[in-house]
Structures are given as structure tokens and as C-alpha cells.
């Protein structure tokens, strides 16, 4: 393992510390924040697995909308 790489256990501890106490979670947003702050890439499934292990299995990954924000606003008019 390279000096800058994190082990899976370290990633899980960081995810746990970052997400603990948070009740309203959008996994995609949290994963992006983690990836940018850690300079690594964690897959959504890694975060989902950790949350499931912590008893937060009702959370799901947010799928990217097929509509742009402008299109969504136009539909509401």
C-alpha cells in the first residue's frame, strides 16, 4: 500500500466519524464530500454498507435526476 492510500478499515472509521449522529443523510452528497476531503474515491456501496452495518439500512443512494433544474422548475409551472 502506498503512503497516501487509506486502508479499508481506515476509510470505514473516517466514514463512521463523518456520518455519526447524522440522521438526515443523502449518501451521494456525503460520499462526494468525503471523496473531495480525503482525496480518494469511495463508491456509494461502500458508504451504504457501512451505514447498513451501523443499523441505518433504510437509507438509499440518490439517483441523478434525468432532468435539469431548469426542466424541473418548468414542470412545476
Image: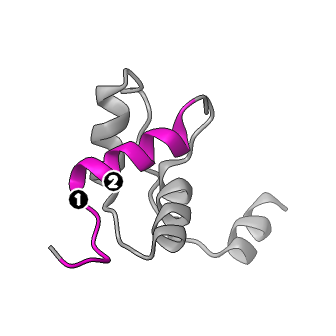
Q: Is residue 33 inside the magenta stretch?
A: no
Prevailing secondary structure class for the magenta stretch in the rendered image? helix
Count neighbours of disc 1 (C-alpha within 10 A) and say few if under 14, some if 14 to 19, many if 20 or more.
few
Quadrant of image for the N terminus: bottom left
Q: Position of residue 19 (x, y in %)?
A: 53, 40
Do the CB atoms of the residues marked 1 and 2 lie less than 8 Å apart?
A: yes
Residue found at the far right of this picture: 77
Residue found at the far left of this picture: 1
Q: Position of residue 13 (x, y in %)?
A: 38, 43
Count neighbours of disc 2 (C-alpha within 10 A) and say few if under 14, some if 14 to 19, many if 20 or more.
some
* Secondary structure type for disc 1: loop
At x 50%, y 40%, the residue is 17
Residue found at the far top of this picture: 55
Quadrant of image for the C terminus: bottom right
Q: Position of residue 64 (x, y in %)?
A: 48, 65
In front of the other: 67 or 19? 19
At x 31%, y 52%, the residue is 10
Q: Which residue corresponds to mark 1?
A: 7
At x 26%, y 77%, the residue is 3
In front of the other: 54 or 68? 54
**What's the distance in space between the residues labelled 1 and 2, CA to CA?**
6 Å
In front of the other: 31 or 4? 4
* Secondary structure type for disc 2: helix
Q: How was the colour assigned to the protein in this rendering?
A: one colour
- What range of the chain is rendered magenta? 2-20
Is residue 8 shown above or below 72? above
Q: Is residue 5 inside the magenta stretch?
A: yes
Q: Position of residue 48 (x, y in %)?
A: 34, 42
Q: Which residue corresponds to mark 2?
A: 11
Going by the image, does 13 lie left or right of 62?
left
Q: How many marks?
A: 2
Is residue 33 shown above or below 19? below
Amino acid at each position: 500500500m502506498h503512503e497516501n492510500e487509506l486502508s479499508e478499515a481506515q476509510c470505514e472509521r473516517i466514514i463512521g466519524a463523518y456520518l455519526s449522529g447524522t440522521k438526515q443523510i443523502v449518501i451521494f452528497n456525503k460520499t462526494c464530500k468525503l471523496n473531495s476531503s480525503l482525496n480518494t474515491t469511495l463508491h456509494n456501496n461502500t458508504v451504504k454498507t457501512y451505514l447498513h452495518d451501523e443499523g441505518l439500512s433504510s437509507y438509499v443512494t440518490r439517483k441523478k435526476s434525468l432532468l435539469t433544474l431548469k426542466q424541473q422548475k418548468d414542470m412545476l409551472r
